[in-house]
Image (tube, coloured by chain):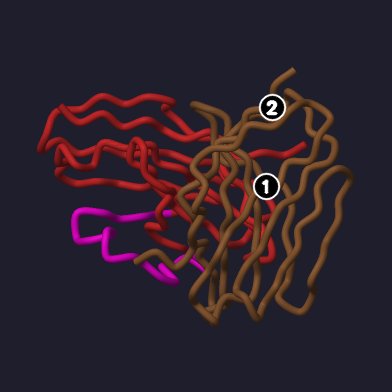
Chain colours: A red, B brown
Amino acid sequence: EPEVTQTPSHQVTQMGQEVILRCVPISNHLYFYWYRQILGQKVEFLVSFYNNEISEKSEIFDDQFSVERPDGSNFTLKIRSTKLEDSAMYFCASTEVSYEQYFGPGTRLTVT
Amino acid sequence: DQQVKQNSPSLSVQEGRISILNCDYTNSMFDYFLWYKKYPAEGPTFLISISSIKDKNEDGRFTVFLNKSAKHLSLHIVPSQPGDSAVYFCAASGWTGTASKLTFGTGTRLQVTL
C-alpha cells in the first residue's frame, strides 16, 4: 500500500540554523500539507500546497517558513532560522481528493 | 481557538466491550469529519470519516455518528481489542476553494485492557 515517507526521522539543530524537512507524498496525490505537534499538544495545521503554490497557511507559518516541490516527488519544508519553540514533530500529509489526508511518520525536530 | 474539542483525555475499556470516543465542534462551516488513530512516534493513521450530509458511517468494527444540531460526533469501536490502544484524534474540515486543512482535537488516549 502506498504511503507518505519523511526524512530524516529525527533532526537536531542549533538555534538560528536552517533546516529542511523532506517528504515524499503518495504519487497520485495532488494536495500536500505540513502539520506540527508540539509535545503534549494537538496537531496543528501549518500550510497547504496545491498546483505548485500555497493554498492556505496558518499564523504559525511566518516568513521563516517556506515550502517547495522541487521535483515531481519531493515536498519540502524549510525553516530559515530555527527557534527553540520550533521544536516539535512535523508531519507531512497528502491527499487525492482533499479531505482524507494521509500522514507520514513525522520528523522530530529538536532545536537546542 | 478550540474549534474541535475532545473533553476526555483518556478512556479505559475492557477487551470485547464497546469504546465510545466523543468530539464536539463549534464551527458551522465544517462539512467533513474524520477520526485518526496515533501510536507514539508515528504519524496519524486515517480510520474513518463522515460527511455532514450523513449521520452514520460504518466500517467493520468502527462506526462514526454525527449529530449536526448538537455539533457532536462520536466514534464507536465494537468489540474493542488490545491493539486499539492508542490516541484517537477527531478532525474537522471545510472546503476553502483550493484545499481543505484539518482542524484537530486534543486527542483521547484509549487503553483497552485484558
Magenta region: which residues? A49-68
Residue at image mark 2: B112
What's the chain of the residue with tag 2? B
Q: Is residue A59 magenta?
A: yes
Quarter of the image where the C terminus of chain B is located: top right
Name the spot of residue B85 as percent of width and height, x first: 65, 29
Task: Give whichever of discs 2 and 1 has the lower sequence position.
Answer: 1
Res A35 visible: yes
Q: Secondary structure at mark 2?
A: strand
Residue at image mark 1: B46
Mark pair 2, 1: CA separation: 19 Å
CB within 8 Å, label 2 to label 1: no
Name the spot of residue A3 as percent of width and height, x first: 66, 38
* Amino acid identity at mark 2: Val
- Left or right side of B45 for B83: right
Q: Residue at x 36, y 55 (%)?
A: A67
Place residue B73 in its image quadrant. Answer: bottom right
Residue B24 higher or lower than B58, as above or below:
below
Q: Residue at x 49, y 27 (%)?
A: B41
Which is more toward the observer, B14 or A45? B14
Name the spot of residue A13 as percent of width and height, x first: 20, 27
What's the chain of the residue with tag 1? B
